[in-house]
Amino acid sequence: MPTVIKKIFLLLAISFSTYASIPTTEGLFRNGNNADVSANLIMLKAVVSSKVSSMLMEKPAEEISSTQEKEAITDGPKVIHAKFLLSTENGERVQLIQALYTSGKMETDQLADVRYFSNLKEKVKKSPPRLALFYSLLTSLALNRSEEIDTFLRLNSKNYKSNKDLVDPEKKALYERYKRYLKLIKEDESLKETMSNPMKPEDPEVAKSIEIVKNKSFMMRDENVSLLKSTNGFKWVIDLDVMSAVFDNKSHRLEKLSFGKVDKNLIFNFDDYILFDGTHELPKLVNLVSPSEEVEVRMTSLTHLNLGNKSMPTRYGEYRDFLKDSKSKEEELDNFLLR
């Protein structure tokens, strides 16, 4: 690592330590309790079952607007088997292949639907809230990423602040000046004689003001995050205008998330975190409750792989070929992942 970058990282590390024990919204969604992801292809398998929400079933028949919803009340839970291939080969861009099967064996003749998203953040922008949140939380939990949930909250919340928004502007400007200074004197050491070090100005008054800036935390406190006492101990709570989320105090595991622009009518519950491969953990159960539908996503497998010579578009093409020969049809499926 270049010496200039080492110095900057050291200064930032010292600065961040002030608020190290106080998380931010974005920081909590990075799933820091999980082990780092080193593979560039993550495969998740899950059983997804859905049924009509109890909220809808309790309504009088005349208040249920959709004929489809009325008919669905008499049906039992609908079950599909899902495979998610998540690729991080392109850094900031996450690619997703979603394959849905009619059987848990997930054989090629049981493939009923396959979809490919070359940039999951763009899919999050265009999807309804429950699907956008599901994909955002999938990358948060499986890839330790906050980029997708950040994208979702920037579109939907007025008081959400990302880590970038919380950076102290004065301190950021000081480090930018120092970074330029280090770069210039590295290229030409003679400039040390004529250039002033932004961190050590000669003017006493300027030096005092610089010390004040240096002693400030690089990150301002996230006012949307607080530590609250509950019946099960203390919890970190995110409280935004359109969303609230509860995390365990020590492990920072996400336990519950509620979303709604008027009422918190979209609820995710996360339970029973387990290690799937001895290193990486996920909640075994994710429950999603909306006014019309209750969904249970039971994670059955988590595997860290490598793409090798087979790119995501190539893999998607193979799935499309499987779908042509499959005995299963998309019409057999009825699930929020298709909406």
Image (tube, rainbow, N blue to C red):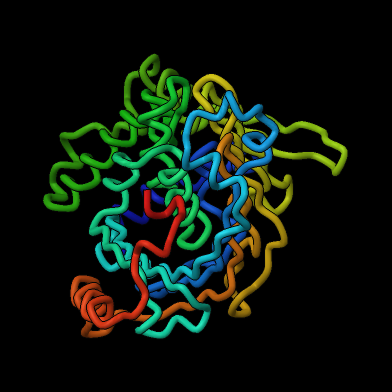
* Residue at x 55% of width, y 28% of height: 222
- Nearer to us in this view, 4 or 273: 273
Q: Residue furthest top?
A: 205
The quadrant in which residue 151 appears is top left
Residue 197: x percent and y percent? 28, 35
The quadrant in which residue 73 appears is top right
Q: Is residue 225 left or right of residue 212?
A: right
The image shows residue 191, relative to residue 297, as above or below, that is above
* Residue at x 37% of width, y 23% of height: 170
The image shows residue 227, relative to residue 296, as above or below, that is above
- Nearer to us in this view, 61 or 24: 61
The image shows residue 116, relative to residue 64, as above or below, that is below
Q: Is residue 25 visible?
A: yes
* Residue at x 19% of width, y 71% of height: 313
Q: Is residue 212 left or right of residue 187?
A: right
- Nearer to us in this view, 136 or 173: 136
* Residue at x 53% of width, y 46% of height: 29
Q: Is residue 18 visible?
A: no
- Nearer to us in this view, 194 or 228: 228
Residue 198: x percent and y percent? 30, 31
Q: Residue furthest right?
A: 231
What is the count of numbered marks? 0
Residue 2: x percent and y percent? 28, 61
Q: Is residue 220 left or right of residue 167?
A: right
